[in-house]
Amino acid sequence: MAINENIKSNLNAACELTVRLNELVVLGNDETKEGDALREALHGVWIELPKQQRDLIQYLSADLDLLSGTETVVISKVAVPRKSSRKPGAVQPPNLRHRVNKAIELGHWKGVLDLIRLDPIIWTAAQRAFLRAEAYRRIGLPAAAVAFYRFALTLEPKEWAYRTGIIQSLMAGSDIRELEAEIANVTRDPEAPAGALIISAAALCRQFAATRGEERRAYAERVVDLTLLGLGKPLDIATREPRLRYRARFMAAIALAELGKLRDAVAQASEGIRECPEIPQLYIFRGVLNFQLGEQYVEDFAASVKFGTTDPVPYGIMASDSFRRRNFRECLELSKTGLSLDPRPEFKAMFLMFQAISQFELGGSSAGALRLFEASRELDPENKTIQRNFDIMKARATQERRQRFTDYLYTPDVVTSTLNKNREELMSGLPIEDFTESGRLAAMMA
């Protein structure tokens, strides 16, 4: 269940304070003025949280005992010190590993945390830290995730899943310097695998979406360099899956377009389509780029419609093309679909105009067409094409003359605005979750 922003903010604040307090515990400095101040601040935030979130912070505090070697194990409701002489796995709830694996498959990450606490010894310390890091990251507590990833990294410093997990967690925070430092660690390492380079590029992609001017261009150049470097490396598990590689191609295409290298951007989008041909966003992006280049673009928008895009713009461009060819039945169906996708007012006005004319040309009443035109004009009163066609419809309705309706031609500024809108949405919401699937989690679930 979603929680409101105020609770989310307090929860993350409580998480950060808990992690910091645990750091002092590990150093043996918790019984200090700083420790007292942290406990007081934590209590002030914690008490304001709903019970479910308070419990989550309390359980986090217990999970963090792993970092100081004081974790307890719950077996049949009896707490046993982590350093007990019991052999790992000697006593455990039946099928616990299977239950954890199932929870991971279903994305029940809080359940993963609860199940690990039943008998953590059946996993190594590094595995427990990694599982908890993954769970807290997916739950939305990046500070906790980073703490567990860093601990796992101290135990297995050559495991790249931990490094990429840290970067992905830091992407959710506001500490750009720490994020940049982690990316630098990756880029400096000649053994960095493709997945680590691509997740670093994804982090930079999010950053350049939030900047402007020369800073934005600088980020775009780094995104291109890192993404292409990653794609040029032998494929590790993280980049073997075509759906992951198309996202990397998409990032490169977005950044190249930002730099004005439109043909290079088209080439990257085309590679992404070759590797994963059922993704409608790739066709939309390539179509807009081809429009800017003066190349054929209708086919790309048609492909995005074929693969079920939920963006109304391609339906508008396809409806415009159908209208130009006087295929009114096709234009009508495309317009109806476009209207069902909750388009912006100017696009809704256009769809209503197409619907009015198409229905009229297919034998519908002039009165119904005029009503649709009135709704269209209210949404976009400055649109001259809509006004001209409205005047023609009125003339046609009175049988004054059989005048041809005016084609709706997309202008460069309309399509360019579509490109910019797509860039911003893609850069801020690019799905990169799967990039950290380096095989580490899959191996543990085997």
Image (tube, rainbow, N blue to C red):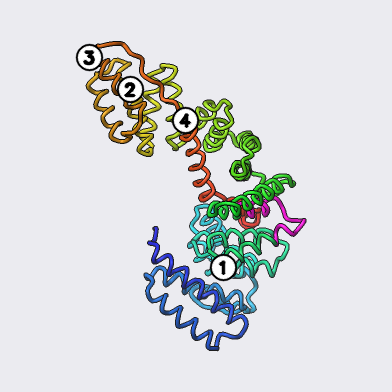
Q: Nearer the viewer, mark 1 or mark 3?
A: 3
Q: Which mark is residue 301?
A: none
Considering depth in this image, is 432 or 360 the residue closer to the camera? 360
Q: In the visual, does 146 lie left or right of 314?
A: right
Give the secondary structure at mark 2: helix
Give the secondary structure at mark 1: loop
Residue at numbered disc 1: 92
* Mark before the other along the chain sequence, 2 or 4: 2
* Mark before the other along the chain sequence, 1 or 3: 1
Give yes or no for residue 384 being in the magenta stretch.
no
Residue at numbered disc 2: 389
Judge whether residue 336 can be spotted in this image: no
Given the image, on which type of amino acid does mark 2 rest?
A: Asn
Give the secondary structure at mark 3: loop
Q: Which mark is residue 411?
A: 4
Q: CA distance from mark 3 to mark 4?
A: 32 Å
Residue at numbered disc 3: 398
